[in-house]
Amino acid sequence: MRWPDRLAGMIGGLLLLAVLVPMGLMLWSLLEQGAGVLSMDFLLEDPRQAGRAGGIAALLVSTGWILAVCLLVAVPVGLGCALYLSEQVPAGTRRAQWLGGVLDMLAAVPSIVYGLFGYQFFAISLGLGFSILSGALALALMVLPLMIRSAEQALRGVPMSYRQASEALSISRWGWVRRILVPQAAPGIAVGIILSIGRALAETAVLLFTAGYVLRQPDSLLDSGRALSVHIYDLAMNVPGGMPRAAATGLVLVAILVILNLLVRRWLRPAQGAWQ
Amino acid sequence: MLGKTLKGFLLVWLLSGCQPAEDKLVITGSSTISPLMAELAEQFEAQSGIQVDVQSGGSGRGISDARQGLADFGMVSRALKTDEQDLTAHLIGRDGIAMIVNAANPVTALSNAEIVAIYTGEQQNWSSLGGNDAAITVVHKADGRSTQELFLAHFGLNNDQVQPDMVIGENQQGIKAVANDVNAIGYVSIGTAIYEADAGAPLRLLPLSGVPATLESVDQGRYPLSRELNLVSQGELSETASQLLDFMTDPDRAATYHDYYFLPVSR
């Protein structure tokens, strides 16, 4: 190998290391501060004393509900929008560029804006108050642009020849969408959904003013419930002595995200190409 | 399959809408009060069975949520202003605001004039105040925080005059900023500062006008920069709301107040 190539390789490696080291340090500091309180009981107990004692069971339940309702709204709507874009708006036209641009802009809106809108619209105007429903709907609005764009790209990626073949066989439009287009694009759509789940789980700002801070187990979707990310924020920022449990909750959240990622990888691998 | 799930959720939603929500109290506002409030709410819930939801977000939010009827009580960590007299304030406790510097900073006291000079940017180096030859990092609170309003009012400052190096939100952020910077100066809730200093954070609480920043001096009314902790409400209190208020001001709650380094109001 010529020396400039070798040098470039080395610099690249160093840059990679420069990215990995802070990530390792971050995890280490979470472990250092939080490992002491992390235990099975931490996962199974409800929080006490504003989160300074007890565990995070109620928060896992709230987070699960928020995520479930968010996906229940965002996935069908997102897929519907993506289908419209890929089927009715030919790529490269002015309309496609406009709609794509608007979606990209929405995706770039700071999440606190979605939070304030959710507070005004869902909590106050629709009278849902501080509730899991308000939070989940505001969160769904936030992840929709990402969901639509990634699903749209997956749908547009299905080869034109498939469409031509289905037309030649005079398969109905609905049959084409249901039997060929969506199954073919499924891995891409799934990746979009997983990315959205990741964003939703990590989101704090949207939920501060909508799903709220309540530490109790929610009885219904109209109860306020604190998500894991909000718990980390509140413990680290507002509660004196909350740092160890904030770090432990952070570790749990990181673990959930990693597991989610691994599951998706495993789930997608055999599916690729084998999809009929 | 998807249809079934949807129907199931719709059912859950409808059923949940049928639940009576009348014996539930919603309290929002000051992030200074909310940890204390959350714990007292927990105790109250265990005793009375009445649910209390505590939401954080700042005193400004407490005021606006109480006005809009979104909350039964707003938590406001200051006295009500003249344009907020449509609300009723219920005093539940007291807290002071402490000037803090890093424990490694040799400065042990500052006069009011010196603090004003620091915050207006006239004094930018610790050396002439008896400290190291280093630039001062001025940590200031964001707008809408009652700690900031009280600080400005006490020192007769206008927010435009302040030249901050760092603008922060919550108390813990102020603690972290000063604990991590030898040359920083900031101001936070006395309770939080004492708690963190006791827990080993490298902080020093400066006396104000010669009065030490302790809970005792706040309690005795000697500490010049103290504030009221209020629950504010609009209109008449419901029965459950006044029950909660009685519970909070009961002398038996004093230990919980002290856990959060606040002073209960003596009845």
Image: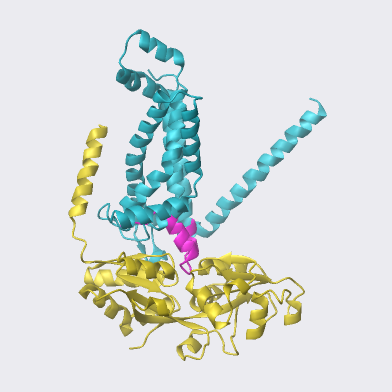
Chain colours: A cyan, B yellow
In the visual, does A199 lie left or right of A24? left
Query: Which of the two residues, A214 or A258, is positioned nearer the viewer here?
Result: A214
Residue A256: name its quadrant. top left
Q: Is residue A25 magenta?
A: no
Percent of width and height locating residue A102: 48, 38
Percent of width and height locating residue A135: 36, 52
Instruction: Please determine whether, in this image, residue A38 is positioned above or below residue B75.
Output: above
Q: Quadrant of the N terminus of chain A?
A: top right
Res. A228 visible in picture: no
Q: Which residues are magenta?
A: A224-247
Seen at 47% across and 90% down, the residue is B221
Instruction: Please determine whether, in this image, residue B169 is positioned above or below residue A25.
Output: below
Q: Is residue A235 magenta?
A: yes
Seen at 78% across and 34% down, the residue is A7
Query: Which of the two residues, A199 or A87, is positioned nearer the viewer here?
Result: A87
Seen at 44% across and 68% down, the residue is B58
Query: Which of the two residues, B192 or B64, is positioned nearer the viewer here?
Result: B64
Instruction: Please determine whether, in this image, residue A19 is positioned above or below residue B168.
Output: above
Secondary structure mainly formed by the magenta segment: helix
